[in-house]
Amino acid sequence: MSDEQPEITGFNGHRHMSLDEIATLQPGLARIMPDIGIRAWKLYYAAEAGNWPLANFQMKEMGELMEFGAFTRPKYEGDLEEFMNDKMRAIGNAIKAQNFEQFKEAFDEAISQANAYHEKYDKPFLRWKLPEQPPLDLDVTPR
């Protein structure tokens, strides 16, 4: 009797892949952060318009993406958790209070901290900024 375990494979309809091959397909932060940036853009303009349910939704989606990034890239886990527990919590509190001034202060601090993390990880050339206009693909006004 052999002590070897059978290789676990999966089939995506086009090819069989080992578990290790499937694991390498998981996106890193380079693929996740643009999605987070889009959500942050929509979050800001939803809050500015007073659409607090949409702002809350975008914030929660950002958090889920960050949790996914922390899981797939443990090198960044501590900083992502710190960001979520500090900066994202402050944004969430402003959303609950439906206070745009409080929100804007928390949002600006979050941008500053996010860009500080880019510098910490030797990527000072990555500087996120809020686009100057609301997203064109989403009506951010309240219903």
Image (cartoon, rainbow, N blue to C red):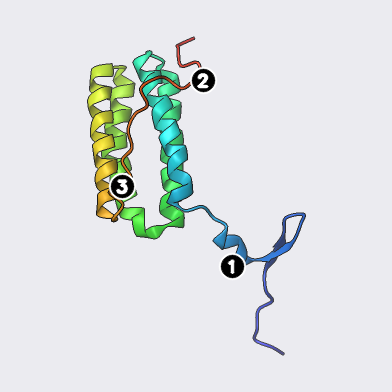
Q: Earlier in the sequence, mark 3 or mark 1?
A: 1
Q: Earlier in the sequence, mark 2 or mark 1?
A: 1
Mark 1: give few (<14), some (14-19) or many (20+) Cα within 10 Å: few
* Horizontal side, residue 130 vs residue 113: left or right: right
Which quadrant of the view contains residue 88?
Answer: top left
Task: Identify the residue at image location x=45%, y=40%.
Answer: 34
127 is higher (above) or lower (below) than 50:
below
Q: Secondary structure at mark 3?
A: loop
Q: CA distance from mark 3 to mark 1?
A: 32 Å
Q: Secondary structure at mark 1?
A: helix
Q: Quadrant of the N terminus?
A: bottom right
The location of residue 74, given as percent across then percent down, is 39, 59
Task: Identify the residue at image location x=61%, y=61%.
Answer: 22
Q: Earlier in the sequence, mark 3 or mark 2?
A: 3
Residue denoted by label 3: 125
2 is higher (above) or lower (below) than 39:
below
Residue 138's label in the rendered image is: 2
The amino acid marked with disc number 1 is Asp
Residue denoted by label 1: 20
The location of residue 46, given as percent across then percent down, is 40, 19
Q: CA distance from mark 3 to mark 2?
A: 29 Å
Which of labels 3 and 1 is toward the front? 3
Task: Identify the residue at image location x=24%, y=45%.
Answer: 116
